[in-house]
Image (cartoon, rainbow, N blue to C red):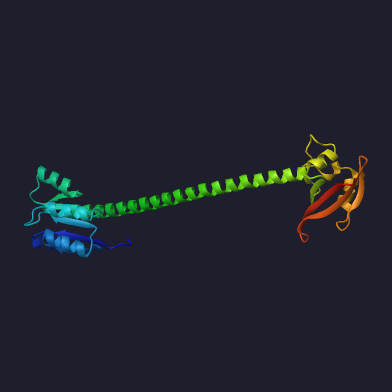
Amino acid sequence: MAENVRILCVDDEANVLKALQRLFMDEDYEIETAESGETGIAAMEQQEAQVIISDYRMPGMNGVEFLKQVYERWPDTVRIVLSGYADTASVVEAINEGQIYKFIPKPWNDDELKITIDKAIETYFLRKKNLELSKELQDSNEELTKLNENLEELVEERTEEVIFQNKVLARSQYILDSLPVAVLGIDISGCIVQCNRYFQELMQEENISLLGENISHLPPVIQNIIEKGSSKSPQTITIAGQHYLAFKATMGDHKAPQGEIVVLTPIP
């Protein structure tokens, strides 16, 4: 057990306190004694105990009043009453006012009292562990709530970004489709990744998108430009009786090309 166990014994009879000290002499407990409820409160203010054993009838502050204050100020403690004057009304009052764990009559049976104290200590640490787990769960739930809120914000931001990018792509495609030249983009695997409306019409494929097709679907004259054309000087080609200047450029960085771009400009 990592935490030292401290037991506070409160009784106005010195012989009772000595008897309790002798009873727990061989146990690994720290035993503190007080001869009144007032000194018991003072002892708790100096150092808290996990278990409190209090007499029921004491001059001045009686056991019920004492344990009621203990419960209000240190609710996690396990509170036990010893009394030689127990009756039903006394038991009910003690339980209601001081939230008593156990009511033990005097004279007590040593073995039974030891078992009661062992169970009281076990109860204390179980309650403490439950509180710690509850706090951890609460903290985890709060953290999860914050993560969800952040995730919602991130999703919203990403959604806005995607919407914006889609608008940009749509405008870019609109601009390409409005150009009076044919534009073709091919990736390094030979797949068509971009072509504008002019190029679609030139290939007589107005109703079928060429995107995703291989360059093998294109006329040999276009394939020849892609495979052998120079990016330094344009070539003149003829398609369907119309002459074009064919410009070729590298897509992406020259050190890490992503493909080729071909632009066909009609010659009047």
Relative placement, left or right, of 216 versus 163 is right
**Residue drawn at (91%, 52%) of the image:** 235
**Residue drawn at (82%, 55%) of the image:** 249
Residue furthest front as drawn:
268
What x and y, as percent, mark residue 144? 45, 49
Which quarter of the picture shows residue 74?
A: bottom left
Which quarter of the picture shows residue 177?
A: top right
**Does the rendering let one see residue 108?**
no
Q: Looking at the image, which is closer to me, 237 or 67? A: 237
Q: Looking at the image, which is closer to me, 252 or 118? A: 252
**Does the rendering let one see residue 3?**
yes
Relative placement, left or right, of 39 versus 147 is left
Give the mark count: 0
Image quarter (top left, top right, bottom left or bottom right) of the N terminus: bottom left
Residue furthest left as drawn:
59
Q: Looking at the image, which is closer to me, 222 or 12? A: 222
What x and y, as percent, mark residue 153? 51, 48
**Residue drawn at (37%, 52%) of the image:** 133
Relative placement, left or right, of 172 versus 125 is right
From what the image shows, is residue 203 above or below residue 117? above
Q: Looking at the image, which is closer to me, 190 or 37? A: 190
What x and y, as percent, mark residue 19? 13, 61
What x and y, as percent, mark residue 231? 85, 56
Image quarter (top left, top right, bottom left or bottom right) of the C terminus: top right
Relative placement, left or right, of 72 versus 170 is left
